[in-house]
Each structure stands twice: as C-alpha cells, then as structure tokens.
Image (cartoon, rainbow, N blue to C red):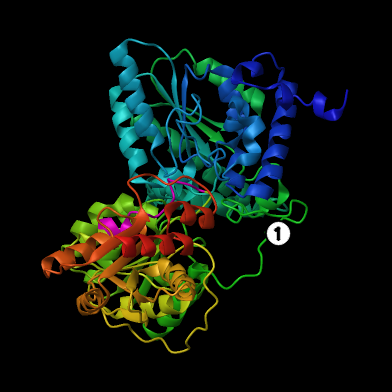
C-alpha cells in the first residue's frame, strides 16, 4: 500500500467521514490538509495564511456538528479552504480560483455545505441571525454557527449583528477566530476603561508603593516587577472580551487554544445542547504550519503563485502595477503638499500605500475593515482643509455608498476616491470584480469621475484629483501597467476634456480607461482590412467632453462605445443620454461592456474576451455597427 493510499484525506468524502476518526487521526488529517492547501495555493494563488490558521477549527466544527443540516456560515471565506476540501471538493481543489473551477470563497451554487455566499467581510453574524429566525418560523431545530475572523470584527456590521442577536436570545453560536492580527487594537481600545480604573489616584499610589518594595528585594526585585506587569496585562486581555460579550447577551466561552483539536471538540460538545446565544473565542495562528506565512502573515494573506521552499512569489518581469504607480504618485504629491492624507480600509499594502505610511505616519489612517467610517472620516478631514485620499478597492466602496452621497457629495467636500481593482480582477471572482462604480458614482451630484488609459495618465489624474476642489474619483485596473514612459512633471488634466488618439472616416470607437488600449489595437487591425476607425480616449465619464463626442459622432455616423463596467447606467449610457439631449440623429451605435450579469472568476484576458471588450470583440462590434 503506497503512501498516497494510506493518506487519511483520501478517504474523506464528506464531513460524516470525520466522525469515526480518533483525535490522533484528526491531527494527522490536519497536517495533510495543510500540505494540500500549501501545494495548491502555491500554484493557483489564494488566501493562504487565514486558511492555514483555521484547519483544526474547521475539523472540530464538522466533527461535532452535522452539516449540512447544521448551518456553518464562514465570514469573508478567507479561512474556508479546509471546509471546501472536506465537503466533497478535494478532487477539484486544484481548480481553486481557476476559470470554471471552484471559487476561492463559499458559494451557494457550488455546494450544499456553503450555506451563505460571501466575499466581503462581517456579514456572517447577520446572515446567521436571519437563518435562526427562519428556523424558528418553520419550527426546526438545527444549529446555526457563524465563524468570524478578528479582522471582520473591526466593521460596524459585525456589532450590529451581535447587538441584534444578543437581544433576541435565541440559539446561535458565534465562533470568533482570533489570530491576533486585528482584534488586539480593538480589545486595547475597549480595555481603556479598565486602564482608567487602574490609574486612579489611590490605586496608582498603591501600585507605586508595591513596585518600590519589590525593587528593594535583592536579586529578584526587577524580575518580580516585570511579572506583575505581565499579569496585569494578561488579566485585562482575559477579562475584557468576556465582559463585553456577556453584556451584549452572550455566554462567553474561551479563550480556547485553536490548534488543540481535542480541546476544541470537547468544548463544542459541551455547548452543543445549550439553547442561547454563545460566543466561542478561539485563538489561532495565521499561517500555521508554513514557516514563511507564520513569519509574514500579511504578505501571505492574499498571495499569487509562490515557491513553497523559499516562500518567494513567482512574479514575472512586468511594468510597475497601477497600484504601485498610485502609491509612488501619492508620495510625490504628499511631499509637495502637507494637507494630503491617505485613508485605507485594512488594505495599506494592497492599495500601494505602505511607502506613504512609512514616510508620513501621522498622515496615514488605516481604519480597518470599516469603509463607511473611512469615508466619513475623510469628509471630516476635508471640512478642516485637509485633502483626504481614500484608497479602496472598487468593490468595497460599494459598502460606503450612503456616506459617499450624504457625507461627501451633498456637502461638496474635496475628498479623493482612488478606486483600485476597477473592472474584472481575475481569480477572486464576482465578489471582487469592480464593475459597478461608473454606474453608482456618475449618478451622484458634484462627483467627478475619470479613468486613465495607462499608468502615466494615472499619475496625472491623481494630481488632477488632489487639485480639484470637490468630490472626485479615479478608477484604475488591477495588474501591471502598459510599460509606457512616465513623465517627471505631473500636470493636472483639464476636467471633462478627452483626447482623440486616432482619426478615421468610417467609424469611431469611444473608449474609457482600460479599454483604450484594445480599442487602438482593434483600429490598427481594421485599418489593414481597409476600415478606417477613429479612437477617442474619453478620460472622463463625468463630466463628459460633450464637444469632442458630438463632433466625432457627427463626423463618422457609426459609433462603438467600450467600457469595463456594467452597461446599465455606465459610460455608454452617459454618451447615449448626451446624444439624445442634443438631438443627434442618423447615427448607428454599438456598445460593449458587461451585460446584466455577475462575471465569474478567471484570468483577466479570458474574461475580457468573454465580455467582448478585448481587441477581437471590439473589432466585431465595429463591423456590426457598420453593417447596421
């Protein structure tokens, strides 16, 4: 019998197969799962560190509870790879995040064990609360367990869910997976009350006298003082979280050692029959079992393919990314103007602001996973003459739309939104594609919206944004730039002014942002076929360059509009509205963009092709327009 046949994991088809395993076998299984996760993610990329830290927790939950009858909801889904592996997807795990493969996040259409589709943080408690209410209405009796990571506890929605759930006093279990990455500052803030007691005058004098006496003890005095301080901090760390959750209506259990599977199983078995809100606090180590991820968990949170032995990313030589260019531009501008501040929502590295944070620590604000707070924080800064730049992924700004409308645009405040990952982002799939921002931003009064055709234009647009007196958004794609030369001097663009990149007599392509390059490529190929096509880089979706667009349409009569955004309410809609308002007639228009659907995961190039916004798709649109 070879080693592959002997592997316990090879015999795990569903969570029911865990029930007959001993604790020692479960420990062995945990290591086999970790090996599979590391080997797979080193090839596919993915959320490595979080999933490595949650393996024992996953096994314990599925060992004690009876999914899919019992409902386990994973917050965000970063930590759910072990869950996928033991719920019938082991043989397909090598397709993780690949085109037409399994998703990197729990997905209802993928498995009955994926109770709730996730991808954005802090939704699990509210979703679980809804499932609990449905269970009560139908008279059923299954268990509902929400697993939420400590980072997700920095978002207000998590506390809204806890507040509701604790008040309802119904049977629900919340598992707080604390990997000590994000919850420590939160606990520290809450423990300030305890600190205020401990620094009262009488207690302060007593502590000073005790320390003075301890220091007088020959040989061991200083060591005893240090031990006293450590005990004091340990008391606060143990006491505060339990009191907080108890006061909110939960029975608090923990903290439990998250990599002792026997302890986890015993505690889950003990609480399984309780019929009240429970919060189980589990301490885990992010990146557990892989040295490089343990040492640098942030770097291995969301990671591309990497060398397992060395822990080095496999990055092909490429031009600097749009993210990198944005970060470098921010550093240049911040040196010139000390009013510029940067705000991000737990994505300092992801938005390219790690250099800014080091250079200007007092002007960098990481608000955690709290996009709403971040936007209104920016609004407050703007009222006092600062120039806040809110760097955030397009898909996550959706969470703060109300704040964009009421707190920024209604007051016409100078807040800059730098929307990274606009368009299709690739392997993270529909929860992370930024395909709605043109539509949801252009409808808001006072907002200026622009998109660069390349990384050099991005730098100029960031300069434009910090110089413009009002709300302004710059959206740019994920990935490497085009490798174009970059100007040393940054000059603001004229607001609402596009550019004609190519003249043509037969038709014209109106392109924006990332679609400009494939539009130019399409025009060049069509020229070889005898079709003369103009190309316009719109630059701005709001305000549009009405003169340029109307002049172009009047000249050629056949117009193709291309955008990396949903067609409904986007760039093409804005152009058609302009044409209608100005009474333009006698023209043929074809639009290419994202249809009324959610785009699945896959390489960007293939997704562009499927959406018809690559060079071939644009050529097809031009020919259809000419024939129409």
Residue 153 drawn above or below residue 140: below
613 and 214: which one is in front?
613
What residue appears at the point 82 percent right and 24 percent down from the top-left corner?
A: 6
**Where residue 596 appears, x then y in whole percent?**
32, 46
Q: Looking at this rendering, what residue extends furthest in the right direction?
A: 1
**Where residue 43 appears, x then y in whole percent?**
68, 49
Residue 88 drawn above or below residue 515: above
Q: Main secondary structure of the magenta part?
A: loop
Return the residue at label 1. 312
Quadrant housing the N terminus: top right
- 249 sits to left or right of 495: right
Is 61 colored magenta in this rendering?
A: no
- 390 sits to left or right of 318: left
352 and 212: which one is in front?
352
Is 432 colored magenta in this rendering?
A: yes
What residue appears at the point 53 percent right and 58 percent down from the top-left corner?
A: 605
Quadrant housing the C terminus: bottom left
Tag 1: Cα neighbours inside 10 Å, few (<14), some, or many (≥20)?
Answer: few
Q: Which residues are magenta?
A: 428-440
What residue appears at the point 37 percent right and 46 percent down from the top-left corner?
A: 155
- Tally of numbered discs: 1
- 70 sits to left or right of 510: right
What residue appears at the point 61 percent right and 52 percent down from the top-left corner?
A: 300
**Residue 415 visible in the snapshot:** no
95 and 195: which one is in front?
95
**Where residue 319 appears, x then y in whole percent?**
58, 73
- The local secondary structure at tag 1 comes to loop
Which quadrant would residue 144 be assigned to in this image?
top left
């Amino acid at each position: 019998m070879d080693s592959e046949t002997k592997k316990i994991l090879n015999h795990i088809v569903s969570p029911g197969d865990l029930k007959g395993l001993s604790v020692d076998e479960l420990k062995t299984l945990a290591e086999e799962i970790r090996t599979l996760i590391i080997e797979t993610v080193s090839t596919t990329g993915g959320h490595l560190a979080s999933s490595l830290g949650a393996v024992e927790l996953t096994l314990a939950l599925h060992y004690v509870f009876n999914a899919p009858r019992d409902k386990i909801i994973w917050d965000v889904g970063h930590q759910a790879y072990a869950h996928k592996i033991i719920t019938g997807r082991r043989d397909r795990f090598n397709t993780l995040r690949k085109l037409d493969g399994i998703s990197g996040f729990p997905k209802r259409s993928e498995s009955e064990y994926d109770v709730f589709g996730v991808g954005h943080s802090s939704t699990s408690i509210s979703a679980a609360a809804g499932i609990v209410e449905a269970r009560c209405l139908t008279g059923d009796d299954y268990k509902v367990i929400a697993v939420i990571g400590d980072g997700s506890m920095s978002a207000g929605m998590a506390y809204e869910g806890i507040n509701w759930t604790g008040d309802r006093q119904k049977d629900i279990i919340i598992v707080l997976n604390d990997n000590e990455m994000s919850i420590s500052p939160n606990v520290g803030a809450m423990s300030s009350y305890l600190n205020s007691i401990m620094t009262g005058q009488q207690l302060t004098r007593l502590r000073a006298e005790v320390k003075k006496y301890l220091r007088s003890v020959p040989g061991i005095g200083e060591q005893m003082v240090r031990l006293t301080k450590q005990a004091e901090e340990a008391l606060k760390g143990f006491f505060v979280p339990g009191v907080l959750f108890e006061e909110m209506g939960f029975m608090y259990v923990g903290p439990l050692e998250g990599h002792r599977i026997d302890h986890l199983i015993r505690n889950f078995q003990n609480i399984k029959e309780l019929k009240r809100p429970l919060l189980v606090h589990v301490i885990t180590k992010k990146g557990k079992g892989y040295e490089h991820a343990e040492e640098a968990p942030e770097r291995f949170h969301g990671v591309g393919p990497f060398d397992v032995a060395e822990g080095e990313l496999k990055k092909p030589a490429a031009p600097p990314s749009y993210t990198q260019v944005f970060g470098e531009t921010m550093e240049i501008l911040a040196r010139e103007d000390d009013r510029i501040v940067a705000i991000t929502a737990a994505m300092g590295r992801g938005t390219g602001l790690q250099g800014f944070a080091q250079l200007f620590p007092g002007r960098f604000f990481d608000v955690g996973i709290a996009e709403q707070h971040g936007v209104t924080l920016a609004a407050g800064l703007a009222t006092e003459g600062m120039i806040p730049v809110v760097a955030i992924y397009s898909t996550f700004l959706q969470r703060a739309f109300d704040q964009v409308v009421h707190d920024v645009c209604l007051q016409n405040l100078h807040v800059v939104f730098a929307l990274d990952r606009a368009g299709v982002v690739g392997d993270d799939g529909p929860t992370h594609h930024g395909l709605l921002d043109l539509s949801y931003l252009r409808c808001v009064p006072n907002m200026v919206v622009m998109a660069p055709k390349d990384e050099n234009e991005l730098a100029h647009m960031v300069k434009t944004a910090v110089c413009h007196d009002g709300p302004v958004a710059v959206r740019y794609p994920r990935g490497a730039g085009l490798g174009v030369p970059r100007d040393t001097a940054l000059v603001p663009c004229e607001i609402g002014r596009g550019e004609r990149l190519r003249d043509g007599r037969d038709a014209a392509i109106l392109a924006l942002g990332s679609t400009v390059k494939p539009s130019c490529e399409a025009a060049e190929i069509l020229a070889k076929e005898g079709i003369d096509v103009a190309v316009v880089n719109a630059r701005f979706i709001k305000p549009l360059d009405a003169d340029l667009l109307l002049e172009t349409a009047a000249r050629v009569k056949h117009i193709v509009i291309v955008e990396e955004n949903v067609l409904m309410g986007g760039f093409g809609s804005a152009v058609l509205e302009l044409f209608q308002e100005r009474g333009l007639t006698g023209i043929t228009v074809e639009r290419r963009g994202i249809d009324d659907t959610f785009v699945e995961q896959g390489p960007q190039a293939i997704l562009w092709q499927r959406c018809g916004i690559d060079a071939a798709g644009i050529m097809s649109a031009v020919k259809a327009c000419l024939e129409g």
